[in-house]
Amino acid sequence: MARPVNADAQATQAKILATAYDLFASHGIDGASIRDIARGAGVSLAMVHHYFGSKQGLYSACIQAMLTELGGLGVELQEMLGKGVTQPASILAEAVRLGFRYAKNHRTAVRLLQRSLVDTGEIDSRVRDENMVPFLDTVSQVLGGLTGRPARELRLPLQSAVFLVVRWAITSEREIAQLAGDAVSAYKPRQDVPAHIVAIEEHLVEAALRLLGMTPPAPTPA
């Protein structure tokens, strides 16, 4: 049976998008050329223009794909933080772990998110206005309800905690192992998670809680 034409078109678009996704994340919109993207995807320049119109159109499609990929994190975190718990530090600690693991598992998407920050000093305005700001507002309101503190006091330290999580999430396994140093000895592997990753998770938990004025729970001994 012949393959449907629309299926071939979708596969071609997906191949172009995946290649552009990686190149934009690595080199930014100015550093990645349409020619390189077409070569990497194994298609012609005309094919890229046919499906996406221009490099800006392709970049916008990558941003939308990135937002879709990362969108599940905000939902999971907001559901977790919204649970009726009596120990806000414990639920926030687990939220930090979840955020770090999620970002680490979606590293290319996070690198693309950060690429415009590296290139221009600012997050893509669409991402900032439609996703980052609403997320910070929502989570700070939830944290305010859990802690009894004004949400406006929590928003900036929350942003700093997010910056830390993102920075460590896009760090290579090799560099994490090197930078974790002697801290690794205080932790043991957790299921399939090596000790140096556990050490960074718990460091992020402690840093986030201290930034938000909460007392970190005692670490689990190795």
Image (cartoon, rainbow, N blue to C red):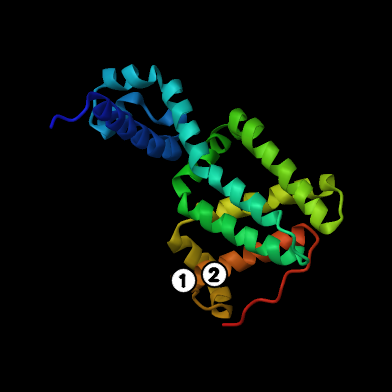
Q: Which residue is mark 2?
A: 198
Q: Position of residue 73 (x, y in %)?
A: 57, 49
Tell whether label 2 touches label 1 (CB within 8 Å). Answer: yes
Name the residue at 67% across, 42% down.
135
The amino acid pointed to by label 2 is Val
Name the residue at 70% across, 76% down.
218
Q: Position of residue 108 (x, y in %)?
A: 44, 45
Q: Nearer the viewer, residue 155 or 82?
A: 82
Under circle 1, the secondary element is loop
Asked where in the image residue 21 lies, by quadrant, the reply is: top left
Name the residue at 73% across, 43% down.
138
Residue 151 in view? yes
The amino acid pointed to by label 1 is Pro
Q: Nearer the viewer, residue 143 or 84?
A: 84
Q: Quadrant of the N terminus?
A: top left
Q: Nearer the viewer, residue 22 or 100?
A: 100
- Mark 2 closeness class: few <14, some 14–19, many ≥20 residues within 10 Å: many
